Image (tube, rainbow, N blue to C red):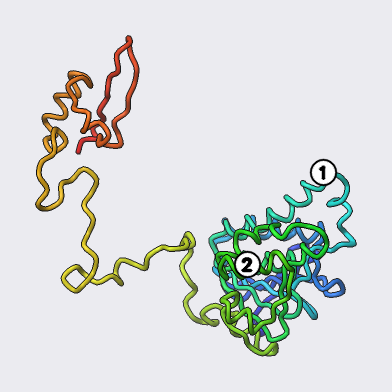
Amino acid sequence: MSESAQPVDTGYQALRLEREGAIDWLCLHRPDRLNAMDRRMCEELQDYFGALSTRHATRVVVLRGAGRAFCSGYDLKAAQEVTAGPVRGLRAQRQASEIILRMRRCPQPIVCLLHGAATGGGLALALAADVRIAAPSARMNVAMVRVGLTGCDVGISYFLPRAVGASVAAELMLTGRFIDADRALRIGLVSDVVPEERLPPPGRPLAPGRRAPPRGPRPRRGDAGPLAARAPPDQGGPEPRARRGQPRDGDRPRGPRSDPGRLCRLLRRGHRGLPRAAAPRLPRRLTRAGARGRAHIHLTQEGLP
């Protein structure tokens, strides 16, 4: 952080929020418990990330931990509700998993700064972020399997294979083995490893004074780049795909679908005059409706080929 970051009075007890222009610095603040998650912290994280969708002045969120660790997972001393029976236990698990859902739903990108322990629920918070930067002291593992729980809690089984691949994810979820920052960098779990004293500056997205990234939906896995970056067909780029229902160059007419007028006449008379080969290729806006024992096909104006 820089000296220009200003504390924000939110009323939170387990979190500290500071604002630097369009950047929110959100700090997990239970250093005496290595920032372990309890009910209060879960409620405050839900409240913060749930309100981001309407907080248009915030463009980037940087998530970090106070003290010697980022987050050591769920506080076992505050886990009475988890072990209080099936109903209350499922409600407590839902309270933690709802944080991950709200982190992924908010439109702002989230940068996570890792140091010390990032285990269990702390690893889940890091995986839900968009960018992860670690200090050499960072150590991560799926801690749930070491206390008799499953390694699939709070979204870990969804995000971890997508971050490091199925084989490494299975190893970590089945064994609970710790990995250090160097291995996390090699397998792609973090973007960079920097000394702990220089950790905040790399976490500042685009640096202060520069243009913040635009708000909008996050890119999905496998999405292509912007259209402007694609080469035109005459320069080796992909050929544009023909629209559904339009014949390609050199294709022969195939029945009534190649003649919109004939197709409309057949549809007005009913489906009996429509060849079977044309039925599966009807426009998407064609809907079937039963009336007086006879199937009629209604064609909307937008569904015309």
Residue 224 on image: x %, y %: 37, 65
Q: Which quadrant is home to the N terminus?
A: bottom right
Quarter-of-image position of residue 27: bottom right
Whether residue 9 appears in this view of the structure is no
Do the CB atoms of the residues marked 2 and 1 lie less than 8 Å apart? no
Other-residue count near label 2 (Cα within 10 Å), few / some / many at <14 / 14–19 / ≥20: many
Residue drawn at x 66%, y 72% is: 63
Identify the amino acid type marked 2. Answer: Ala
Q: Which quadrant is home to the C terminus?
A: top left
Residue 122 on image: x %, y %: 72, 68
**Mark 1 = which residue?**
86
Between the residue at mark 2 and the residue at mark 1, the CA separation in whole angstroms equals 28 Å
Whether residue 155 appears in this view of the structure is yes
Other-residue count near label 1 (Cα within 10 Å), few / some / many at <14 / 14–19 / ≥20: few
User: For the residue labelled by badge 1, is the local secondary structure a helix, a strand or a loop?
Assistant: helix
**Mark 2 = which residue?**
169
